Amino acid sequence: MNEQTKLIQFAAELIQEVINNSEAGQDNEDGEGDSFREDEFTRLMIEYLTDAGELDDGEVCYHRNRGIKVNGYSINQDFECLNLFISIYTQSIPPVTVTKQEVETAFRRLTNFLQKALKGYHLSIEEASSVFDMALQIHDLRTQLSQIRLYLFTDGRTTIDVKQHETIENITCSFHVWDIERTYRCLSSGKQRETIEIDFESQYGVAIPCLPMPRSNSDYTAYMVIIPGEILYKIYAEYGPRLLERNVRSFLQARGKVNKGIRQTILQEPHRFLAYNNGISATAEAVELVDLPGGGKGIKSARDLQIVNGGQTTVSIYQAAKKDKADVSNIYVQAKLSVVAPEKANEIVPLISRYANNQNKVNEADFSANDPFHIQIEEFSRTIWAPAVDGTQRQTRWFYERTRGQYLDVKGREGTAAKKKIFTTTHPTSQKFTKTDLAKFENTWNQLPHLVSLGAEKNFREFTIQLAKRGKFQPDEDYFKRLIAKAILFRKTEKIVQVQQFGGYRANIVTYTLAYLSNKTAQQIDLERIWREQGLSPALQEAIKIVSYQVHQVIINPPGGRNVTEWCKKEECWKQIQTIEIELPNEFWNELISVDTKPNQIDKGIESPDTEDLKVIVQINEVSDETWFQLAHWAKETDNLHSWQRSLAFSLGKLAAKRKSPSYKQANEGIKILHEAEQLGFKYTHDSNGKISV
């Protein structure tokens, strides 16, 4: 299949995904009902560019008025860079040409919105609308912003490659066009981001002096480099977070503000920066070397440059120069540059990043697509059939896209058009989900809607940290089926909320509505039934409709402030919603799982015991209550074990007396306590009934 055919196939799949994930032809209160498919297209483009490292995240926010239009926005963590999005969604196959005039018109509408927002456009907008939040934030940050990036998304082809920067209200604005061809190239290149190519001589006027490592048979080469601080500043100013390998970017976002020690050195003792600072580690796919006039080698250019350790150093230099107007011309940064061939990059680069950052605990939570958890979910998604519905015999699968573009790649490997059609029927695009989707489903069910409201990427990072704290977790088939039930619950709720025509904040309403129901029912919603029926009962749908209305009323009336979007990100918002008393139909309550008859069907997500945990729980259940009580008494008399271990032993005794099973955490700690006590001299045996006893 040639590239042109693949591009058309990609465009067709994109349009189908938009259709499946949206509802068209409905009118909002503000007359923006025609934006549903365009909203979904914008959301997908934000997702693609986030995966590509171009964006940290973004929110869909459609607004159109005379001479202005905007489809979404994002603001970086330090509130100095604003991204605004506008979409031209043609829904045409094969992709049509979006003319230069159409591109210019779209950017003009977007810049018109920007100018109005900077000057106080929010004052003329209804406060309950999501565009009010966007316009208000832009206005509030007008003196803080140092950079604005304007993005055009389109499923058509464009002829504009570069549009010159402009200055609006003394802020530099850059223009970025992502058409169907550029998006396809990025997703089909086998990378998770668009490659950065830097020519140091042409862009910055100098080759970077380097010392090559001695030649060996290694599968990489390395260089010791001294980078002028001014060049490092300029590189980051141009490429931003795209320069930072994802592990480092996650670290910076999790840790927050600039390192104060680095900043102090830059401002007060820049000449000692090289002596005080540990430098950075970077990787590249290839470099071009040149001979320097005074002797030695220099790096003329680098392809796919990524900083894998030293993000704090890089960002600190940039912000000191940008915000503090610091002179960085006397700063030099040492760097180790590892050049790794593309075929080895996926194997070696993540390890370089992990080992280079091993002093930072947060990196243990940096969750790659190759993590066993992801791989197991992917394997289940390729082998487990969903039950047939609507009286048909046709079964389908839910496709887990472990890495971006995987769905199209797998489909593309089907040899014939007939086989491709069978693949699509078996794996409908409406049943495709990603890592960020998984995190959204789980954190909503686990009653963390304020985290889900942070945005897909930030919420995923929070889920990752929770999973790392959970320890090794091996999902089984039951976990996968319940996960899909949550996916069905979430996506059906999106459609129910959309029909209510609230006029904005759908994503927030959905996650808070389901979190509320999860909380009030103690997670007793019957996920097994949802999986079995691949849908929601009428009573559950009615409950969702009722709760969504009440949730909407709370989130659009934030206390002491007018920014609904920011309010939804606060735990206080969730605490307030939990206090609402909502009368729900008896039919809904009657459908809930009985804790007495089906306790094992209560799903706790990743906090549920996995297969290995269940084995440990069985072992603990073999220990008699008398043994635990004797152990607790022995530990107290001998002053062995920690006080919390003695307390847990007593608690396990009480559970055993009631013939109740412990949690997986209690069970795992209980096994450790038994082994430690035995080593310290405590004796226990198995009785005639198989129970462990003193």
Image (cartoon, grey):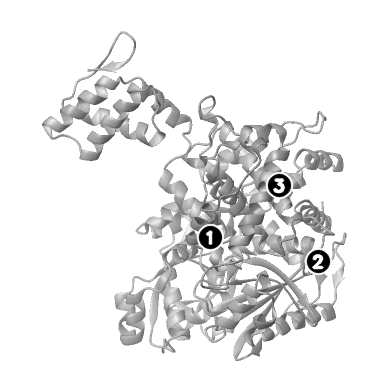
Q: Earlier in the sequence, mark 2 or mark 1?
A: 2
Mark 3–mark 1 distance (CA, rounded to whole Å): 23 Å
- Residue visible at 59% across and 70% down in the picture: 196
Report the disc number at residue 89.
Answer: 2
Q: Nearer the viewer, residue 406 or 132?
A: 132
**Left or right: 32 with respect to 466?**
right
Q: Secondary structure at mark 1?
A: helix
Q: Which mark is residue 398?
A: none
Is disc 3 in contact with disc 2, using a CB cutoff of under 8 Å? no
Q: Single out the residue that lies furthest toward the top.
A: 688
The one nearer the camera, 252 or 231, is: 252
- Label 3 sits on residue: 492
> In the image, 2: left or right of 132?
right
Q: Tell me which amino acid carries mark 3.
A: Lys
For the point 58% across and 77% down, the residue is 137
* Neighbours of disc 2 within 10 Å: few (<14), some (14-19), many (20+): some
In the image, taking residue 504 as reference, residue 220 lies left or right, namely left
Up the image or down, 618 lies above or below 343; here it is above
Q: Residues within 10 Å of mark 1 (few under 14, many from 20)?
A: many
CA–CA distance between discs 2 and 1?
A: 27 Å
Q: Position of residue 372 (x, y in %)?
A: 51, 42
**Cβ–Cβ under 8 Å for marks 2 and 1:** no
Which residue is identified by label 1?
458
SS of the residue under disc 3: helix
Residue at 64% across, 64% down? 49
Place of residue 34 in the rendered image (x, y in percent of width and height, measured from the top left): 82, 65
- Sequence-first tag of 3 and 1: 1
